[in-house]
């Protein structure tokens, strides 16, 4: 069993110079001993760099772990973000940690977006976070995901659209898909409410969709959604999103779709959204 008698932990202000020194220690240790800390994930470093640059840095209970030689084996992404921005960070630092404690680091379960929103003080239902995330990502399938702070800000900016969809989309299995609802929330700003309400009513089964010829668009989408219940793959989510946007756009323009097709470009860009503008997304 490891000896923890010399371990100390306290909150420190880590300067970019100190962060760089510790990262150099890790690289030297790797060269001398062959120990390879996990590779830096450039997307994760990018997320932390954005949060730090935008003033969204928050103190975490997840400490930077240093061994007796001040070589870090936890916290390298945060240290690299500190170096990248040139901004000092407040962070817990645990010194003289035995290296075998790395066996159990980063084994916790990641919180859902809804849980993050609830911690931020938002009173939201179960699926809200997934809808906000889908609405934010749109057709972007990049691995460079949004940070928790960015998603909280995005939800607060687009609360009205998201809550309108949650209130009116229904509760049937085919109506609960987050990517379907995320596309509808995007369309909220461009499409008349009665058009969205009718599409949602047809998808949920509350409107039979046989009265108007244009309803065939929504019926195509309903059949597609019913076929895919239980398939939660990422590619399926993008397909649902793209086909939902195509149906909404065509219906709003009174164009009948004889075949259900997916759009290849974002039909409802959010050009004025501050979160997406910083990410160069639309």
Image (spheres, rainbow, N blue to C red):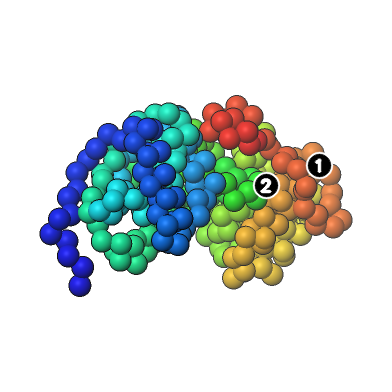
Question: Residue 139: which disc?
Answer: 2
Under tag 2, what secondary structure? loop
Is residue 156 toward the left or the right of residue 239 in the image? left
Q: Tell me the residue at 34%/32% (across/down).
A: 15
Task: Judge the density around disc 2: few (<14), some (14-19), many (≥20) Cα neighbours within 10 Å.
Answer: many
**In this orientation, which residue lies closer to the viewer: 68 or 278?**
68
Task: Judge the density around disc 1: few (<14), some (14-19), many (≥20) Cα neighbours within 10 Å.
Answer: few
| Location of mark 1 (residue) | 254
Sequence-wise first label, 2 or 1 = 2
**In this orientation, which residue lies closer to the viewer: 240 or 153?**
153
The percent coordinates of residue 197 (x first, y second) are: 62, 46
Q: Tell me the residue at 24%/57% (across/down).
A: 97
Q: Nearer the viewer, mark 2 or mark 1?
A: 2
Residue at the extreme bottom of the image, as rendered: 1
The percent coordinates of residue 166 (x first, y second) are: 51, 49
Q: Tell me the residue at 60%/45% (across/down).
A: 137
The percent coordinates of residue 100 (x first, y second) are: 30, 66
When asked about the image quadrant of residue 13, the answer is top left
Up/down of 157 relative to 239, above or below: above
Residue at the extreme left of the image, as rendered: 5
Mark yes or no: residue 199 visible. Answer: no
């Amino acid at each position: 069993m490891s000896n923890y008698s010399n371990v100390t932990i306290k909150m420190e202000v880590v300067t970019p110079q100190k962060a760089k020194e510790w990262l150099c220690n890790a690289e030297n240790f790797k060269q001398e001993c062959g120990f390879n800390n996990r590779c830096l994930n450039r997307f994760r470093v990018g997320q932390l760099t954005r949060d730090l640059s935008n003033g969204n840095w928050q103190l975490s209970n997840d400490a930077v772990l240093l061994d007796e030689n001040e070589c870090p084996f936890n916290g390298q992404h945060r240290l690299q973000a500190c170096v990248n921005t040139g901004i000092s960070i407040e962070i817990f630092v645990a010194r003289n940690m035995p290296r075998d404690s790395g066996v159990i680091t980063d084994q916790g379960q990641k919180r859902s977006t809804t849980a993050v929103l609830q911690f931020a003080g938002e009173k939201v239902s179960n699926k809200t976070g997934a809808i906000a995330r889908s609405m934010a990502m749109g057709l972007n399938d990049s691995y460079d995901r949004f940070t928790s702070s960015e998603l909280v800000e995005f939800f607060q900016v687009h609360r009205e659209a998201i809550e309108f969809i949650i209130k009116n989309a229904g509760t049937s299995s085919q109506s609960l898909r987050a990517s379907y609802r995320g596309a509808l929330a995007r369309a909220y700003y461009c499409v008349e409410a009665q058009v969205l309400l009718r599409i949602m009513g047809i998808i949920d089964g509350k409107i039979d969709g046989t009265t108007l010829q244009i309803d065939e668009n929504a019926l195509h989408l309903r059949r597609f959604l019913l076929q895919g219940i239980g398939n939660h793959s990422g590619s399926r989510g993008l397909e649902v999103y793209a086909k939902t946007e195509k149906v909404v756009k065509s219906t709003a323009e009174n164009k009948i779709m004889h075949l259900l097709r997916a759009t290849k470009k974002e039909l409802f860009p959010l050009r004025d959204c501050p979160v997406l503008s910083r990410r160069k997304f639309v």
